[in-house]
Image: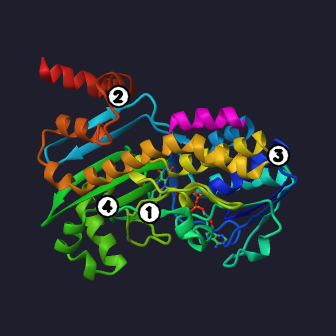
Amino acid sequence: MKVCIIGGGPSALFLAILLKSRGTAEEILVLEQNPKDATYGFGVGLAASAIDKLGAADPVTMAALEEKMHFLTNQVIQNNTGEFKLETTAMGGAITRLDILTVLEQRCRELGIEVHHQRRIDDLAEFDDYDVVVGADGANSVVRTAHEQDFGTQRSPHGNYFVWWGCAKTKLEAGLRFRSYKNGSIMVHYYPYTPDMWTVVGELDEQSWFDLGMDKMTNAERKALFEEAFEDIFEGTPMIENKSDWNQFAGIRNERWSVGNRVLVGDALYRAHFSLGSGTRLAMEDALGLADALAASPDDIPAALAAYEENGKPRKAGLMEATVRSLDWYAHVHEKLDMPILEFIRSYMDRTGRMPADRLHEYAPNLAAALEAQVA
Ligand SMILES: Cc1cc2nc3c(=O)[nH]c(=O)nc-3n(C[C@H](O)[C@H](O)[C@H](O)COP(=O)(O)OP(=O)(O)OC[C@H]3O[C@@H](n4cnc5c(N)ncnc54)[C@H](O)[C@@H]3O)c2cc1C
């Protein structure tokens, strides 16, 4: 089997590794537009359940990733009324995007797969002699755009504005802080990916974006506003930028996952809200789903691609619903800023409708205990 993979992100590299290590494909071409070692963003989170599932599929790769991960067990959640340190049993860990890509590329090399950098693809015609062409090229996928109608691409309405910064700070605890600030409401989510480096996601709803005049500011002014608003937390440590442009989140989904021999994985196929912290996990799980399907029917590609979609769709449908609910919760968080803190966190935990009381007990026992004590 000859497989061409457009993109060199987590989904692309993990797919290449699985196809090669299992002997499914003899020829694998990976084409990435960025130079080697170039990356945007800072650390991304991988949930504990994802580590287990992906580790079962490829223990060697996952062990190498785990070595680079920084594990989390708690975070402080705050609104206008107070704060609470949430201790969780299954939060997982964070890793720099560069480390994920470096580990996966190293594994590719060990398996004899070459990743071709600085190869931006705009025309797919040159890959017509490949058995499968995979669009692993992220949210602005050219593979998807080339067949948008056939894929049945849909976009969810725009949500909050957000940005991704880094911060070098010691003696800090992971946190999710929502607060009123001047005539708007703003939030930060920050978590470590090394002992003293932090990913910081800044976010605000559409109304606050205009009320605070963010639409008329430069990125430097927007950063200064957040640094001032959260001065008590970061104590003057500046946010570090790396392609830190503000964007308005839009979810993406596709009715069909393949068109002919062209198939989508990861953010190209489906974009979950980053508040679910699962984009990298989903991207790698798609790679696993596609690798499984191709391994099961190597001589019947249409059947393999149909199986990939059929097996993967139910899980994605649940996540799409979760994304819409989470987006909605975040878009209306300003209405909840004065809620008693425990009630607020309960609402946050159940924002996707998937945290019944028994699961809360298991996932966040100290919150469940505090809620029970309050009732008593
Ligand atoms: C603010 C923010 C916070 C996030 N936090 C988390 C988190 O905590 N946990 C988490 O799991 N995920 C998080 N994510 C999401 C995560 O980054 C993505 O979901 C994940 O990287 C998707 O992987 P992918 O391989 O599908 O696509 P990408 O990682 O986007 O990779 C696509 C690759 O394709 C290349 N490419 C694109 N077009 C072309 C072309 N035409 N030719 C050649 N190459 C091309 C790109 O350069 C890129 O390297 C976050 C995202 C954002 C924006």
Q: Is residue 172 visible?
A: no
Relative to 306, 85 lies left or right: left
Q: Which residues are magenta?
A: 46-58
**Mark before the other along the chain sequence, 1 or 4:** 1
**Contact? badges 1 and 3 (CB < 8 Å):** no
Specify the label residue 364 is tagged with.
2
* Quadrant position of ligand 1: bottom right
- Estimate the spatial distance between the alpha carbons at disc 1 and disc 3, rounded to whole Å: 32 Å
Colouring used for the render: rainbow
Any mark on residue 24, and which?
3
* Disc nearer the start of the sequence (1/3): 3
Residue 301 in the image, given as x and y percentages of width and height: 76, 51
Front of the two marks 2 and 1:
1
Residue 323: which numbered mark, if any? none
Question: How crowded is the residue under tag 1: few (<14 C-alpha within 10 Å), some, or many (20+)?
Answer: some
Q: Nearer the viewer, mark 3 or mark 4?
A: 3
Mark with earlier residue (3, 4): 3
Magenta stretch holds residue 52: yes
- Based on the picture, tell me whether residue 352 belongs to the magenta stretch: no
Label 3 Cα crowd, 10 Å radius (few <14 / some 14-19 / many 20+): many
**Which label belongs to residue 154?**
1
Question: Disc 2, disc 1: CB below 8 Å?
Answer: no
Query: N-terminal of the two: label 3 or label 2?
Result: 3
Q: Quadrant of the N terminus?
A: bottom right
Most extreme residue toward the top is 376
Picture coordinates of residue 358 (x, y %)?
Answer: 33, 21
What residue sits right under mark 4 in the picture? 203
For marks 2 and 1, give the CA distance.
35 Å
